[in-house]
Amino acid sequence: MTYTATIILNRNLPKETNNLVEHFKKYDGNFTDIFVIEAGSEKNNLSKYCTWYNNSPKVMKNGLRYVRGMNFGLANLWKEDKWEKYDSFFLLTNDTKIPKNQKTIITLQKLLKKHPKVGIISPCSQKWGEKKLIGYNSIKYFWFIHNNAYFLRREFVDQIINKKKPYSKNFLFDGNNFRGYLSESELIAKAYANDWAAAITTSVFAEEDENLLLDKNSIIKTETYKENINLYVEEGLKWMHQKYGFNSKWQMMQYVKLFYDKFFEYFPEYKKFKI
């Protein structure tokens, strides 16, 4: 039986986190264990499903954000000897909205079985232009996916994690890129470089609730939406230049696409899923 570790990142929004957990328990409970990371939440804002609480002074001040938060959660699974229990990991933030009555995790598990070379699957958003490219209840392999909900095959993750330093901030994602701009591109490049594809599916949907950051940034204890976006891009571009020497995001995009195109040269039987 395929089993998934679902990791949800929370910072001071217990209601939204609890609702998300309860949705998965109701519709996917037989196929997943759910872990909630509290990334510097105040004690009165902890989810009732809290699994790990990082309340170090630095995290209380700045949070963990997606890349360090997911590194923290995955490293805890490793530390607690739970890693081998799971065939996949579902990594998402608590501002993810799942459609009512949707069976998400079991559907994504079935897609991994049906597509043995896919290492990353992202649910589509109703707002994305990719929805039209993919079509109804279908899947396509992409070289760029911007989301905060990624379903990862463990076999792929096993190939790229930092096993020598599993408890570092660089376990899966590069934690030096604090806010995570283009971190998904780096992950997708690693997938195609290791003969795994990254896909978007319209068999399930997930939406980012941007209103939470717009309306509740003071509760979350973060910058305003505009300030977040500016820092997200500014800090990410600096990280990218220092690590790769690229001077624009388009160079990063081209870097990923080179691996993407090579994948279909090596595995021409999957060209029908190419965009």
Image (cartoon, grey):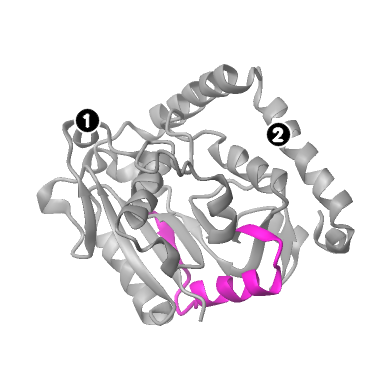
- Which-is-in-front pick, marks 2 and 1? 1
Q: Residue at x 40, y 38 (%)?
A: 165
Q: Are marks 2 and 1 in contact (CB under 8 Å)?
A: no
Using the image as rendered, state which of residue 73 and residue 254 is in the foreground.
73
- Picture layout, residue 83 above or below residue 57: below
Q: Which residue, as the protein is rendered here, is positioned at the far left?
A: 44
Residue 248 painted magenta = no
Quarter of the rendering containing residue 218: top left
Q: Residue at x 56, y 66 (%)?
A: 205
- The disc placed on residue 128 is none
SS at circle 1: helix
Residue 110 painted magenta = yes
Q: Which residues are magenta?
A: 94-120
Q: Residue at x 19, y 36 (%)?
A: 60
- Picture layout, residue 98 above or below residue 274: below
Q: Is residue 254 at all visible to an observer of this figure?
A: yes
Q: Looking at the picture, how far across and down is residue 222, in whole percent? A: 29, 35
For badge 2, the amino acid type reads Met
Number of numbered markers: 2
Q: Is residue 164 left or right of residue 42?
A: right
Mark closer to the chain start, 2 or 1: 1
For badge 1, the amino acid type reads Lys
Quarter of the rendering containing residue 187: top right
Using the image as rendered, state which of residue 159 and residue 244 is in the foreground.
159
Q: Looking at the picture, how far across and down is residue 261, in whole percent? A: 83, 44
Residue named by callout 1 = 58
SS at circle 2: helix
Using the image as rendered, state which of residue 177 and residue 113 is in the foreground.
113
Q: Is residue 20 at all visible to an observer of this figure?
A: no
Residue named by callout 2 = 253
Q: Is residue 148 left or right of residue 10?
A: right
Q: Looking at the picture, how far across and down is residue 90, in whole percent? A: 47, 61
